[in-house]
Amino acid sequence: MFPIYYLDNRLIITENPKNYPDIPSVFTKDKKTFCDYVNRWIDDGNRSDSVVYGYPAVKMFHHLEKCFRYVEAAGGVVQNKENRLLFIRRWNIWDLPKGKVDTGEEIQECALREVSEETGVTGLQITKELPVSFHFYFYKEKLHLKKTHWFLMKTDYDGPLKPQREEDISQVSWLDAAGCRKAFRETYRSLRDNLEQVVCTMITTAAV
């Protein structure tokens, strides 16, 4: 099963549509009908969550990689010694630091580099792999499909935070448990659905 987000809507690729009885489902028999449907779904200003099925989900996702521009990225949920989490604001929306994987770069290496570049935080250590997220976005009028690998990180860094202005980041902040939940309410649904429960539960438990 692959949940892929576009804005606040979710496209679920699955072999078992009966697992989602409350979401409309669409049968697609091959690559062409599947990719054509995805394009119509993206273009539909009244779109809602949708389930798509018809052949093996892994093969369907592979077809999306071929139909659209596929990008892999990596980022981090960073926890400091005061049990606060690192968030950024980009385009006036709370977000988590992440970025595109460079050619030949390892996924974890990319995650550490991007977090440091976007926030100024150093001394990062990866402690756990978190759920990946998928979303569609337009860049230079081309539709892209992005897979983002997320990692839990820790650091003892207590120096100044430095938002990477050239990446349109206006603010970097350490947030407590209440701030974390507020940020997730104001961020992208792809992050909220995939990371809020595991991340906010972790920080709340650690604070007890």
Image: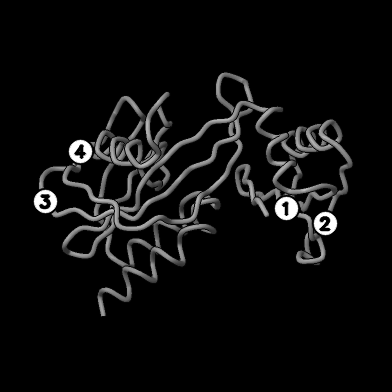
Element at badge 1? Answer: loop
- Mark sitting on residue 156: none
Residue 173 in the figure: left or right of residue 99: left
Q: CA distance from mark 4 to mark 3?
A: 11 Å
Pick the front one: 167 or 116: 116
Q: Earlier in the sequence, mark 2 or mark 1?
A: 2
- In this view, 140 is above or below 40: above
Q: Is residue 51 above or below residue 203?
A: above
Q: Amino acid at mark 3?
A: Asp
Name the spot of residue 143 as percent of width and height, x first: 64, 27
Q: Residues within 10 Å of mark 4 (few under 14, many from 20)?
A: some
Give the distance between the C-alpha atoms of the residues marked 4 and 1, in whole angstroms: 37 Å
Locate residue 75 relative to residue 7 in the image: left or right: left
Under circle 4, the secondary element is loop
> What residue sits 82% from the left and 56% below the top?
24
Q: Are marks 4 and 3 in contact (CB under 8 Å)?
A: no
Circles 4 and 2 in contact, beta carbons < 8 Å: no
Q: Quadrant of the N terminus?
A: bottom right
Q: Are marks 2 and 1 in contact (CB under 8 Å)?
A: yes
x and y, in percent, of residue 59 in the image: 73, 41
Query: What residue did someone put label 3 on?
Result: 158
- Sooner in the amino-acid sequence: mark 4 or mark 3: 4
Q: Nearer the viewer, residue 64 or 23?
A: 64
